Amino acid sequence: MPLELTPEQKEIVRSVREFVDRDVLPNVAKFDRADEFPQEMFEQMRALGLFGITIPEEYGGLSLDILTYVLVVAELSRGWISLSGIINTHFMAAWMVQNYGTQQQKRELLPLMATGDLRSAYSMTEPNAGSDVQAIKTRANRTSDGWRINGQKMWSTNGLRAGMIMLLAVTDPSASPRHKGMTAFIIRKTPGVNEQPGLKIPPNLKKLGYKGVETTELIFDDFDAPAESVLGGEAGIGQGFKYFMAAVELGRVNVAARALGVARCAFDAAITYAQQRQAFGKHISQHQAIQLKIAQMGTQIRAAELLIHDAAVRKSSGERADLEAGMAKYFATEAAQSCAIEAMRIHGGYGYSQEFIVERLYRDAPLLILGEGTNEIQQLLIARRLLELNAI
């Protein structure tokens, strides 16, 4: 690892690595193929304290920094990106409560979130509003005792099993600019129930990869939320876009770490296979064409590590990190895609078989290019920030 880690960081990363090697990698194929939620793995993640990794000790968490979380996410994703998906939306929501919530919200929510007894989804995207967040249409209107919410959300990871949703909705459609009329809401619901008053959760969306963790729509139809559901209380009204964008910046570092895990897994599979498979009288690792691929994969992984660690440390310090997070997300996810396809090429025909791990990596990697803002959007954000920093 390029950074010197504390004994505590080393210990938690070691524990997660052992969990992945012992319990995840030998079993992931059956959960992936069945698109089944890994309940036992989830319970083990709870036992390791991963749901409260960055939550302060006073609320029952481990009080570790974002870098430690990133290291853990990379290890989980080396086993299966769906495991990191189970905690990612939860982590982002907990971070928002910790940084923007009222004291009452922190006291009520963070202890439950730290143990995983309360899990959170994170809901911003809509059918016609992905990268263009200001185009969302979900409305929250004041009532005599709270808010009434109507609208449709898409691609909500953990949307069914979570007991809480961090939701972005429009509270002032006349606001200019539009983002000043958006508010973040803490929605409490019954976990695992498809229909409850004002909220319907249709069957899971079918996906190419990223199996085992549910991805859902959320349909709000006169859903009543209490006044205290506004993140940050009355002072939080109209601040939702800012809160969500800060969390998305964090989420981009997370996605980059997930990509790093996928790339490492692809590299491990490829370099092992290359030293076992023989062709033309020698191991294929001795052929220059394969060595070129191994060199490219290893270099991409190393560069991704450095970008990700830089972004995580900068975000932890409280400094502006949109450039670093965007660069890490863009580079690492492209590296994961590249490593997955190169690992498949090194495996040849076997790489297309479900008997080998690389076909799953090939299906999982594209998600990361799209999640938390497409890589096309990342490049635009990177360029704008670079122009700002280098203006003449």
Image (spheres, helix red, strand yellow):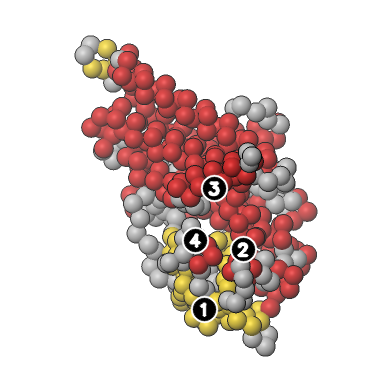
Which mark is in front, 2 or 1?
A: 2
Q: Earlier in the sequence, mark 4 or mark 1?
A: 4
Disc 4 packing (10 Å; few <14; some 14–19; many ≥20): few
Is label 4 in contact with label 1 (beta carbons under 8 Å)?
Answer: no
Residue picked out by circle 1: 150
- Judge whether 281 appears above or below 305 on screen: above
Inter-mark Cα distance, 2 to 1: 18 Å
Inter-mark Cα distance, 3 to 2: 17 Å
| Residue 53 in view in this figure | yes
Q: Which mark is residue 132?
A: 4
Q: Earlier in the sequence, mark 2 or mark 1?
A: 1
Q: Amino acid at mark 1?
A: Asn
Dot 1: what SS?
Answer: strand
Dot 2: what SS?
Answer: helix
Is label 1 in contact with label 3 (beta carbons under 8 Å)?
Answer: no
How many numbered callouts? Answer: 4
Is label 4 in contact with label 3 (beta carbons under 8 Å)?
Answer: no
Which mark is in front, 1 or 3?
A: 3
Q: Which mark is residue 381?
A: 3
| Residue 16 in view in this figure | no
